[in-house]
Image (tube, coloured by chain):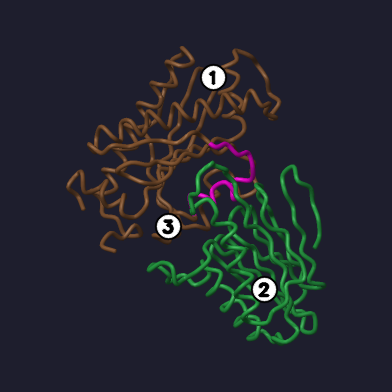
Chain colours: A green, B brown
Amino acid sequence: MEIVKIGMADLNVVKSPGILTTLGLGSCVGIALYDKNSNVAGLAHIMLPSSKEIKNNSNTAKFADTGIELLLKKMLALGANKRSIVAKIAGGAQMFSFNSTNNILKVGERNVKATKEKLKELNIPILAEDTGGNYGRTIELNSEDGSLLIKTIGHGIKTI
Amino acid sequence: MSLDIDNLNNSMIDILKELGNIGSGNAATALATMIEKRVDMKVPQVKILEFKDVSNVLGGEETPVVGIYFEMTGELVGNIMFVLNLESAKNLTNIIFNREDDDLSFTEMDMSALSEIGNILASSYINSLSIMTGLKLKVSVPALSIDMAGAILSVPAIQFGYIADNVLFSETQFEEGNNQVKGNLFLIPDINSFEKMLNSFGVC
Protein backbone atom coordinates (compact mmCIF):
# COMPACT_ATOMS: atom_id res chain seq x y z
CA MET A 1 0.00 0.00 0.00
CA GLU A 2 1.15 3.50 -0.77
CA ILE A 3 2.57 5.33 2.24
CA VAL A 4 2.62 9.11 2.09
CA LYS A 5 4.94 10.79 4.58
CA ILE A 6 4.03 14.19 5.92
CA GLY A 7 6.71 16.45 7.37
CA MET A 8 6.53 19.23 9.92
CA ALA A 9 4.29 22.11 8.78
CA ASP A 10 3.00 19.95 5.95
CA LEU A 11 -0.22 18.18 4.94
CA ASN A 12 -1.54 15.77 2.34
CA VAL A 13 -4.62 13.84 1.26
CA VAL A 14 -5.20 10.40 -0.21
CA LYS A 15 -8.10 8.38 -1.61
CA SER A 16 -8.15 4.73 -0.49
CA PRO A 17 -6.02 2.66 -0.60
CA GLY A 18 -3.09 4.41 1.07
CA ILE A 19 -1.60 5.37 4.42
CA LEU A 20 -0.76 8.86 5.57
CA THR A 21 1.93 9.07 8.21
CA THR A 22 3.79 11.68 10.19
CA LEU A 23 6.74 10.77 12.39
CA GLY A 24 7.87 12.08 15.74
CA LEU A 25 5.09 14.47 16.71
CA GLY A 26 6.13 16.42 19.79
CA SER A 27 4.30 19.61 20.67
CA CYS A 28 2.94 19.68 17.15
CA VAL A 29 -0.51 18.24 16.52
CA GLY A 30 -1.42 15.64 13.91
CA ILE A 31 -4.93 16.21 12.57
CA ALA A 32 -6.44 13.18 10.83
CA LEU A 33 -9.62 13.79 8.87
CA TYR A 34 -11.59 10.97 7.28
CA ASP A 35 -14.70 10.56 5.17
CA LYS A 36 -15.86 6.94 5.31
CA ASN A 37 -18.27 7.30 2.40
CA SER A 38 -15.69 8.36 -0.13
CA ASN A 39 -12.68 6.82 1.67
CA VAL A 40 -10.82 10.10 1.39
CA ALA A 41 -8.31 10.73 4.18
CA GLY A 42 -6.27 13.79 5.05
CA LEU A 43 -3.48 14.40 7.54
CA ALA A 44 -1.92 17.67 8.68
CA HIS A 45 1.11 18.22 10.95
CA ILE A 46 0.66 21.68 12.41
CA MET A 47 3.25 23.51 14.54
CA LEU A 48 1.50 26.60 15.87
CA PRO A 49 -2.05 27.46 17.00
CA SER A 50 -2.90 30.54 14.99
CA SER A 51 -1.82 32.28 11.81
CA LYS A 52 -3.20 35.49 13.26
CA GLU A 53 -0.64 35.67 16.06
CA ILE A 54 2.36 36.26 13.87
CA LYS A 55 3.33 38.10 10.75
CA ASN A 56 5.28 35.34 9.07
CA ASN A 57 2.34 33.19 8.01
CA SER A 58 2.88 32.37 4.36
CA ASN A 59 3.02 28.62 5.01
CA THR A 60 -0.63 27.87 5.77
CA ALA A 61 0.08 24.24 6.74
CA LYS A 62 2.08 25.51 9.72
CA PHE A 63 -0.97 26.67 11.71
CA ALA A 64 -3.99 24.90 13.19
CA ASP A 65 -6.51 27.40 11.81
CA THR A 66 -5.31 27.75 8.24
CA GLY A 67 -3.94 24.19 8.09
CA ILE A 68 -7.31 22.57 8.81
CA GLU A 69 -9.02 24.81 6.26
CA LEU A 70 -6.51 23.86 3.59
CA LEU A 71 -6.73 20.16 4.47
CA LEU A 72 -10.52 20.24 4.21
CA LYS A 73 -10.35 22.04 0.88
CA LYS A 74 -7.99 19.41 -0.52
CA MET A 75 -10.22 16.58 0.70
CA LEU A 76 -13.30 18.11 -0.87
CA ALA A 77 -11.38 18.46 -4.13
CA LEU A 78 -10.69 14.72 -3.96
CA GLY A 79 -14.37 13.91 -3.64
CA ALA A 80 -15.00 13.95 0.12
CA ASN A 81 -18.35 15.07 1.51
CA LYS A 82 -17.97 17.63 4.28
CA ARG A 83 -20.99 16.32 6.21
CA SER A 84 -19.50 12.87 6.71
CA ILE A 85 -15.96 13.97 7.62
CA VAL A 86 -14.79 13.05 11.11
CA ALA A 87 -11.57 13.88 12.95
CA LYS A 88 -9.00 12.19 15.18
CA ILE A 89 -6.17 14.16 16.72
CA ALA A 90 -2.86 13.25 18.35
CA GLY A 91 0.22 15.03 19.70
CA GLY A 92 0.42 18.31 21.59
CA ALA A 93 2.87 16.98 24.16
CA GLN A 94 5.04 19.08 26.41
CA MET A 95 8.50 17.63 25.83
CA PHE A 96 10.32 19.61 28.51
CA SER A 97 8.97 20.76 31.83
CA PHE A 98 10.06 23.83 33.74
CA ASN A 99 8.63 25.44 36.82
CA SER A 100 7.99 28.57 34.85
CA THR A 101 4.94 29.98 33.19
CA ASN A 102 6.69 30.21 29.85
CA ASN A 103 4.13 30.19 27.07
CA ILE A 104 6.53 28.68 24.58
CA LEU A 105 6.59 25.35 26.40
CA LYS A 106 2.82 25.20 26.64
CA VAL A 107 2.51 25.44 22.87
CA GLY A 108 1.40 21.77 22.70
CA GLU A 109 -1.60 22.50 24.89
CA ARG A 110 -2.41 25.62 22.87
CA ASN A 111 -2.09 23.69 19.61
CA VAL A 112 -4.64 21.12 20.81
CA LYS A 113 -7.02 23.84 21.97
CA ALA A 114 -6.78 25.75 18.69
CA THR A 115 -7.29 22.53 16.73
CA LYS A 116 -10.47 21.68 18.66
CA GLU A 117 -11.82 25.21 18.25
CA LYS A 118 -11.27 25.16 14.51
CA LEU A 119 -12.87 21.71 14.11
CA LYS A 120 -15.86 22.84 16.14
CA GLU A 121 -16.20 25.95 14.01
CA LEU A 122 -16.27 23.73 10.90
CA ASN A 123 -18.71 21.27 12.53
CA ILE A 124 -16.30 18.36 12.21
CA PRO A 125 -16.79 15.94 15.14
CA ILE A 126 -13.72 14.60 16.98
CA LEU A 127 -14.13 10.83 17.34
CA ALA A 128 -10.98 10.19 19.36
CA GLU A 129 -7.83 11.88 20.58
CA ASP A 130 -4.49 11.02 22.11
CA THR A 131 -3.01 14.32 23.19
CA GLY A 132 -0.83 15.82 25.91
CA GLY A 133 1.72 13.98 28.02
CA ASN A 134 5.45 14.45 27.72
CA TYR A 135 6.35 12.03 24.95
CA GLY A 136 6.58 11.93 21.17
CA ARG A 137 4.22 10.08 18.83
CA THR A 138 4.32 8.64 15.34
CA ILE A 139 0.91 8.33 13.70
CA GLU A 140 -0.46 6.44 10.70
CA LEU A 141 -3.88 7.12 9.21
CA ASN A 142 -5.30 4.25 7.16
CA SER A 143 -7.58 5.48 4.37
CA GLU A 144 -9.42 2.13 4.15
CA ASP A 145 -11.10 2.38 7.53
CA GLY A 146 -10.00 5.69 9.05
CA SER A 147 -8.13 4.01 11.89
CA LEU A 148 -5.28 5.97 13.44
CA LEU A 149 -2.28 4.00 14.70
CA ILE A 150 -0.18 5.71 17.37
CA LYS A 151 3.36 4.57 18.19
CA THR A 152 5.54 5.88 21.02
CA ILE A 153 8.84 5.13 22.72
CA GLY A 154 8.06 3.59 26.09
CA HIS A 155 4.36 4.48 26.11
CA GLY A 156 3.03 1.65 23.97
CA ILE A 157 1.23 1.34 20.67
CA LYS A 158 -2.48 1.85 20.18
CA THR A 159 -5.13 2.37 17.55
CA ILE A 160 -7.82 4.97 17.96
CA MET B 1 10.09 42.88 11.13
CA SER B 2 13.30 44.19 9.63
CA LEU B 3 15.35 41.03 10.05
CA ASP B 4 14.53 38.11 7.79
CA ILE B 5 15.85 34.85 9.23
CA ASP B 6 15.10 33.03 5.98
CA ASN B 7 17.44 35.34 4.08
CA LEU B 8 20.49 36.09 6.17
CA ASN B 9 23.49 37.56 4.41
CA ASN B 10 26.99 36.09 4.54
CA SER B 11 28.38 38.44 7.16
CA MET B 12 25.49 37.54 9.48
CA ILE B 13 26.17 33.84 8.98
CA ASP B 14 29.89 34.41 9.60
CA ILE B 15 29.08 36.11 12.89
CA LEU B 16 26.85 33.21 13.91
CA LYS B 17 29.58 30.73 12.97
CA GLU B 18 32.11 32.63 15.00
CA LEU B 19 29.75 32.82 17.97
CA GLY B 20 29.25 29.08 17.67
CA ASN B 21 32.96 28.51 17.40
CA ILE B 22 33.92 30.51 20.47
CA GLY B 23 30.92 29.35 22.48
CA SER B 24 31.53 25.70 21.71
CA GLY B 25 35.27 26.14 22.26
CA ASN B 26 34.62 27.33 25.77
CA ALA B 27 32.10 24.55 26.26
CA ALA B 28 34.66 21.95 25.15
CA THR B 29 37.24 23.40 27.56
CA ALA B 30 34.70 23.20 30.37
CA LEU B 31 33.94 19.60 29.48
CA ALA B 32 37.67 18.72 29.36
CA THR B 33 38.16 20.24 32.81
CA MET B 34 35.21 18.34 34.17
CA ILE B 35 36.24 14.91 32.90
CA GLU B 36 39.98 15.62 33.22
CA LYS B 37 40.63 14.41 29.70
CA ARG B 38 41.64 16.00 26.46
CA VAL B 39 38.61 16.96 24.41
CA ASP B 40 38.94 17.78 20.73
CA MET B 41 36.42 19.80 18.83
CA LYS B 42 35.69 20.10 15.13
CA VAL B 43 34.91 23.45 13.56
CA PRO B 44 31.20 24.01 14.21
CA GLN B 45 28.87 24.09 11.27
CA VAL B 46 26.09 26.61 10.99
CA LYS B 47 23.13 25.06 9.25
CA ILE B 48 19.90 26.51 7.97
CA LEU B 49 17.29 23.87 7.27
CA GLU B 50 13.66 23.67 6.31
CA PHE B 51 11.37 22.24 8.99
CA LYS B 52 10.86 18.99 7.15
CA ASP B 53 14.61 18.31 6.99
CA VAL B 54 15.40 19.12 10.60
CA SER B 55 15.04 15.68 12.12
CA ASN B 56 17.22 14.09 9.45
CA VAL B 57 20.18 15.76 11.14
CA LEU B 58 19.99 13.17 13.88
CA GLY B 59 19.22 10.15 11.73
CA GLY B 60 15.46 10.38 11.21
CA GLU B 61 12.36 11.46 13.08
CA GLU B 62 11.96 8.27 15.10
CA THR B 63 15.57 7.90 16.22
CA PRO B 64 15.72 8.18 20.00
CA VAL B 65 17.88 11.09 21.19
CA VAL B 66 18.67 12.95 24.41
CA GLY B 67 17.66 16.60 24.52
CA ILE B 68 18.77 19.01 27.25
CA TYR B 69 16.92 22.27 27.19
CA PHE B 70 17.54 25.69 28.80
CA GLU B 71 15.86 29.02 28.95
CA MET B 72 18.02 32.05 28.35
CA THR B 73 16.97 35.29 30.01
CA GLY B 74 18.45 38.73 30.55
CA GLU B 75 19.22 41.15 27.74
CA LEU B 76 18.74 38.39 25.19
CA VAL B 77 15.75 36.10 25.52
CA GLY B 78 15.56 32.65 24.00
CA ASN B 79 16.52 29.04 24.43
CA ILE B 80 19.47 26.76 24.16
CA MET B 81 19.15 23.08 23.43
CA PHE B 82 21.84 20.45 23.37
CA VAL B 83 20.93 17.24 21.52
CA LEU B 84 22.95 14.02 21.57
CA ASN B 85 22.36 10.64 20.01
CA LEU B 86 22.09 7.76 22.50
CA GLU B 87 25.59 6.41 21.77
CA SER B 88 27.15 9.80 22.41
CA ALA B 89 25.13 10.26 25.58
CA LYS B 90 26.23 6.82 26.78
CA ASN B 91 29.86 7.58 25.93
CA LEU B 92 29.66 10.78 27.95
CA THR B 93 28.24 9.04 31.01
CA ASN B 94 30.83 6.28 30.61
CA ILE B 95 33.58 8.89 30.71
CA ILE B 96 32.07 10.56 33.78
CA PHE B 97 31.58 7.32 35.70
CA ASN B 98 34.79 5.77 34.35
CA ARG B 99 33.16 2.57 33.06
CA GLU B 100 32.46 0.61 29.89
CA ASP B 101 28.79 0.07 29.27
CA ASP B 102 27.13 -0.47 25.90
CA ASP B 103 23.59 -0.76 27.17
CA LEU B 104 21.67 2.20 25.78
CA SER B 105 19.34 2.60 28.73
CA PHE B 106 19.82 5.42 31.18
CA THR B 107 19.51 5.38 34.96
CA GLU B 108 18.44 8.38 37.04
CA MET B 109 22.13 8.87 37.83
CA ASP B 110 23.04 8.89 34.12
CA MET B 111 20.33 11.43 33.36
CA SER B 112 21.42 13.61 36.24
CA ALA B 113 25.02 13.50 34.96
CA LEU B 114 23.86 14.38 31.43
CA SER B 115 21.83 17.32 32.74
CA GLU B 116 24.88 18.53 34.58
CA ILE B 117 27.10 18.23 31.50
CA GLY B 118 24.45 20.10 29.53
CA ASN B 119 24.38 22.71 32.23
CA ILE B 120 28.12 23.26 32.03
CA LEU B 121 28.12 23.37 28.23
CA ALA B 122 25.19 25.79 28.07
CA SER B 123 26.62 28.02 30.80
CA SER B 124 30.01 28.30 29.16
CA TYR B 125 28.39 28.91 25.80
CA ILE B 126 26.17 31.65 27.19
CA ASN B 127 29.04 33.09 29.14
CA SER B 128 31.12 33.60 26.01
CA LEU B 129 28.08 34.93 24.16
CA SER B 130 27.61 37.44 26.96
CA ILE B 131 31.24 38.54 26.87
CA MET B 132 31.28 38.92 23.07
CA THR B 133 28.04 40.85 22.84
CA GLY B 134 28.47 42.81 26.06
CA LEU B 135 24.92 41.81 27.01
CA LYS B 136 23.92 40.41 30.41
CA LEU B 137 22.60 36.86 30.10
CA LYS B 138 21.29 34.20 32.47
CA VAL B 139 20.53 30.55 31.96
CA SER B 140 17.86 28.39 33.65
CA VAL B 141 18.29 24.96 35.19
CA PRO B 142 18.33 22.12 32.63
CA ALA B 143 15.33 20.05 31.56
CA LEU B 144 16.07 16.66 30.02
CA SER B 145 14.03 14.43 27.74
CA ILE B 146 14.81 11.18 25.93
CA ASP B 147 12.47 10.61 23.00
CA MET B 148 12.09 10.59 19.21
CA ALA B 149 14.31 13.10 17.40
CA GLY B 150 11.28 14.58 15.64
CA ALA B 151 9.51 15.24 18.92
CA ILE B 152 12.59 16.69 20.64
CA LEU B 153 13.50 18.87 17.67
CA SER B 154 9.95 20.12 17.31
CA VAL B 155 10.67 22.26 20.38
CA PRO B 156 13.32 24.50 18.76
CA ALA B 157 11.56 24.18 15.38
CA ILE B 158 8.33 25.59 16.81
CA GLN B 159 10.19 28.51 18.27
CA PHE B 160 11.75 29.24 14.92
CA GLY B 161 8.27 28.77 13.47
CA TYR B 162 7.20 32.03 15.10
CA ILE B 163 9.77 33.98 13.17
CA ALA B 164 10.74 32.00 10.08
CA ASP B 165 10.24 29.03 7.81
CA ASN B 166 13.70 27.68 8.49
CA VAL B 167 15.66 26.52 11.51
CA LEU B 168 19.12 27.82 12.18
CA PHE B 169 21.51 25.92 14.40
CA SER B 170 25.14 25.12 14.96
CA GLU B 171 26.43 21.60 15.07
CA THR B 172 29.44 20.89 17.20
CA GLN B 173 31.32 17.65 17.44
CA PHE B 174 33.37 16.79 20.51
CA GLU B 175 35.82 13.90 20.77
CA GLU B 176 37.57 12.25 23.66
CA GLY B 177 39.96 9.41 22.76
CA ASN B 178 37.92 6.64 21.15
CA ASN B 179 34.73 7.87 22.70
CA GLN B 180 33.11 9.94 20.08
CA VAL B 181 30.63 12.40 21.35
CA LYS B 182 28.65 14.17 18.70
CA GLY B 183 26.39 16.91 19.88
CA ASN B 184 24.16 19.48 18.27
CA LEU B 185 23.73 22.80 19.92
CA PHE B 186 20.73 24.93 19.06
CA LEU B 187 20.77 28.58 20.00
CA ILE B 188 17.30 29.98 19.57
CA PRO B 189 16.99 33.68 20.35
CA ASP B 190 13.59 35.27 19.91
CA ILE B 191 13.34 37.59 16.92
CA ASN B 192 14.06 40.83 18.80
CA SER B 193 16.99 39.24 20.57
CA PHE B 194 18.31 37.92 17.29
CA GLU B 195 18.39 41.42 15.92
CA LYS B 196 19.92 42.76 19.12
CA MET B 197 22.61 40.09 19.01
CA LEU B 198 23.60 40.84 15.42
CA ASN B 199 23.32 44.55 16.20
CA SER B 200 25.95 44.27 18.89
CA PHE B 201 28.36 43.28 16.10
CA GLY B 202 27.16 46.06 13.83
CA VAL B 203 25.82 43.84 11.06
CA CYS B 204 22.12 44.42 11.32
State the residue at coordinates (74%, 42%). A154
The residue singled out by tag 2 in the image is A42
State the image coordinates of residue B131 (x, y, percent, origin top left): 25, 32
State the image coordinates of residue B136 (x, y, percent, origin top left): 28, 37
SS of the residue under disc 2: strand
State the image coordinates of residue A36 (x, y, percent, origin top left): 79, 80
The residue singled out by tag 1 in the image is B178
Of the pair A122 and A28, the residue shown nearer to us: A122
Residue B149 highlighted magenta (yes or no): yes
State the residue at coordinates (60%, 75%). A118
Distance (Cα) linking label 1 and label 3: 34 Å
The residue singled out by tag 3 in the image is B166
Which circle's residue, 1 or 3, is located before the other in the chain? Answer: 3
SS of the residue under disc 3: strand
Circle 2: residue type: Gly
Circle 3: residue type: Asn
SS of the residue under disc 1: loop
Question: Do residues under tags 2 and 1 come within 8 Å of each other at their CB atoms?
Answer: no
**Which span is picked out in magenta?**
B143-157
